[in-house]
Image (spheres, rainbow, N blue to C red):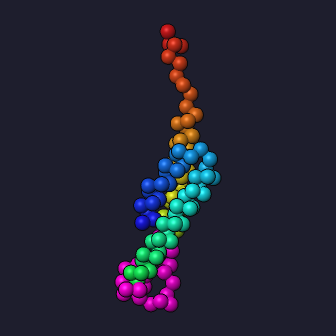
């Protein structure tokens, strides 16, 4: 779920929001909400004896889950930065004077 949210929102936030800090904060809010929902969904499955996301041992920390979601989180910040650069180049393009060629 967080991967889908990152793909759907990170680049457009960087592209359309002029202030990069505002885009980062918006992404943090969206990611935080979806991460919480995803964790709750996976935790409910784990309580129902599913070990697809978490280990069966409750004392073992889910570091693999942490690594994957942290990687997705960082990719989102990279996509925001890329979108901001592409959007800034597009906004700062100089207009072509067609009358100058005559």
Q: On screen, 30 above or below 20?
A: below
Q: Residue furthest top?
A: 102
Quarter of the rendering containing residue 42? bottom left
**Residue 82 falls within the magenta-colored stretch:** no
**Residue 91 horizontal side relative to residue 68, left or right:** right
Please state which of residues 91 and 100 is positioned toward the viewer in this rendering. Answer: 91
Please state which of residues 89 and 17 is positioned toward the viewer in this rendering. Answer: 17
Q: Who's the residue at 45% across and 60% down the image? A: 5
**Residue 3 horizontal side relative to residue 32, left or right:** left
Q: Which residues are magenta?
A: 47-69
Q: On screen, 48 above or below 83?
A: below
Q: Who's the residue at 49% across and 9% down the image? A: 102
Q: In the rendered view of the protein, which quadrant contains the N terminus?
A: bottom left
Q: Who's the residue at 54% across and 49% down the image? A: 14
Question: Where residue 9 appears, x then y in whole percent?
Answer: 48, 54
Total marks in image = 0
Question: Where residue 11 appears, x then y in whole percent?
Answer: 49, 51
Question: Where residue 20 appears, x then y in whole percent?
Answer: 61, 50
Please state which of residues 9 and 96 is positioned toward the viewer in this rendering. Answer: 9
Q: Who's the residue at 52% across and 42% down the image? A: 86
Residue 95 visible at all: yes
Question: Where residue 73 appears, x then y in whole percent?
Answer: 52, 63
| Prevailing SS of the magenta stretch | loop
Q: On screen, 92 above or below 59?
A: above
Please state which of residues 50 and 65 is positioned toward the viewer in this rendering. Answer: 50
Residue 82 visible at all: no
């Amino acid at each position: 779920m967080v991967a889908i949210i990152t793909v759907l929102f990170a680049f457009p936030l960087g592209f359309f929001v002029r202030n990069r800090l505002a885009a980062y904060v918006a992404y943090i809010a969206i990611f935080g909400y979806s991460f919480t929902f995803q964790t709750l969904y996976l935790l409910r499955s784990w309580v129902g004896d599913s070990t697809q996301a978490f280990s069966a041992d409750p004392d073992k920390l889910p570091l693999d889950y942490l690594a994957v979601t942290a990687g997705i989180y960082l990719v989102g910040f990279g996509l925001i930065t890329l979108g901001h650069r592409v959007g800034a180049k597009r906004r700062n393009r100089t207009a072509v004077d067609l009358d100058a060629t005559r």
